[in-house]
Image (cartoon, grey):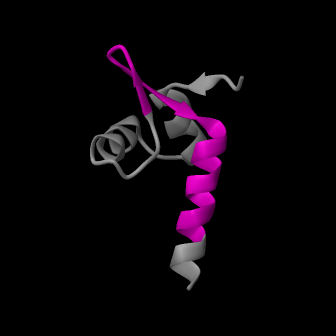
């Protein structure tokens, strides 16, 4: 099983602020899981989401 990323790790990975990632998560714009009170992110889902977003912007 793949290790889940924290909001800070995703922010660093995507070169965004933690606040931006948190807002996108709350708005359902980025794939995330809520485990207890913490948001967690699957890296492969984030990679797929980024690829989909970049494809949509180029078409």
Q: Is residue 38 magenta?
A: yes
Using the image, determine if residue 32 lies above or below residue 47. Answer: above
Residue 11 image point, x, y percent: 49, 38
Q: Quadrant of the C terminus?
A: bottom right
Q: How many marks?
A: 0
Q: At which x and y percent is residue 52?
A: 58, 65
Q: Is residue 43 magenta?
A: yes
Res 17 quadrant in image: top left
* Residue 40 pos. (x, y %): 48, 27
Residue ranking furthest to the top: 36
Q: In the picture shown, does residue 30 fall above or below 54?
A: above
Q: Position of residue 5 (x, y in %)?
A: 57, 27
22 vs 29, nearest the viewer: 29
Q: Which residues are magenta?
A: 33-54
User: Is the residue 51 above or below the residue 16 in the image?
Assistant: below
Query: Of all residues shown, which one is farthest toward the bottom?
Result: 59
For residue 33, side relative to residue 36 (left or right): right
The quarter of the picture where residue 51 lies is bottom right
Q: Residue at x 34, y 37 (%)?
A: 22
Work out whether residue 6 or residue 31 is closer to the camera in this orientation and state it: 31
Q: Who's the residue at 60% across and 44% down the image?
A: 45
Q: Does 24 sit left or right of 11 as displayed?
A: left
Residue farthest right in this picture: 1
Q: Which residue is found at the position 70% from the left and 26% from the top? A: 2
Q: Identify the image quadrant of the N terminus.
A: top right
């Amino acid at each position: 099983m793949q290790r889940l990323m924290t909001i800070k790790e995703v922010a660093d990975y995507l070169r965004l602020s933690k606040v931006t990632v948190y807002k996108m998560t709350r708005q359902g714009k980025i794939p995330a899981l809520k485990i207890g009170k913490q948001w967690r992110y699957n890296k492969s889902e984030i990679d797929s989401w980024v690829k989909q977003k970049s494809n949509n912007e180029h078409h």
